[in-house]
Image (spheres, rainbow, N blue to C red):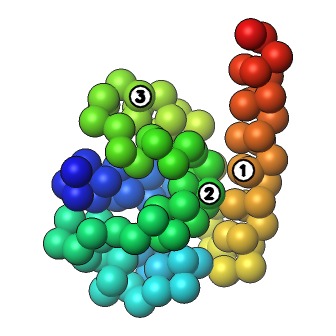
Amino acid sequence: MKSTIAKNLKALREANGYTQEKVAEYLGIGRSAYANYESGERETPLDVLEKAAALFGCELSLLFEEDEAAMRNMLVCAFRADNLNTADMHEVASFKNVVMNYLKMERLLEK
């Protein structure tokens, strides 16, 4: 499972155009710790996974997804911006959270 999470973290980070340093800064951890999560050398704590999912604008479950088609579909919607600081990244994550909640509500209302 660590390797799946690691692969997905890296793919989502790269699709969004973030460096390991910027993601680590947003998560409140060191770059080397984040690099270890991305390489699968260390198990990623749940709170870090939750914050990463918020930043990448995806459901937490997507980080555990082994289906590459599901990941590709998510990567199509990646938001890319250059030179974001940590405060900007928090704003992006907040916006993505609003969008994710809206999409969840739409799915619920369809049923």
Q: Residues within 10 Å of mark 2 (few under 14, many from 20)?
A: many
Element under label 3?
helix
Q: Name the residue under label 3.
A: 70
Q: In this view, does 43 lie to the left or right of 55?
A: left
| Image spot of residue 82 (x, y percent) | 62, 67
**What SS does tag 2 mark?**
helix
Residue nearer the viewer, 64 or 14: 64
Image quarter hosting the C terminus: top right
* Pointer 3 or 2: first along the chain: 2
The image shows residue 7 at horizontal and vertical percentages of: 27, 52
Where is mark 2, residue-wise? 54
Task: Give the amino acid at mark 1.
Answer: Lys
Residue that label 1 marks: 96
At 73% across and 51% down in the image, what residue appears? 97
Q: What residue type is labelled 2?
A: Ala
Q: Is mark 1 on a helix, strand or loop?
A: helix
Residue kind at label 3, given as amino acid type: Ala
* Residue 20 vertical position relative to residue 77 in the rendered view, above or below: below
Q: Residue at x 57, y 65 (%)?
A: 51
Outermost residue on the bottom side: it is 30
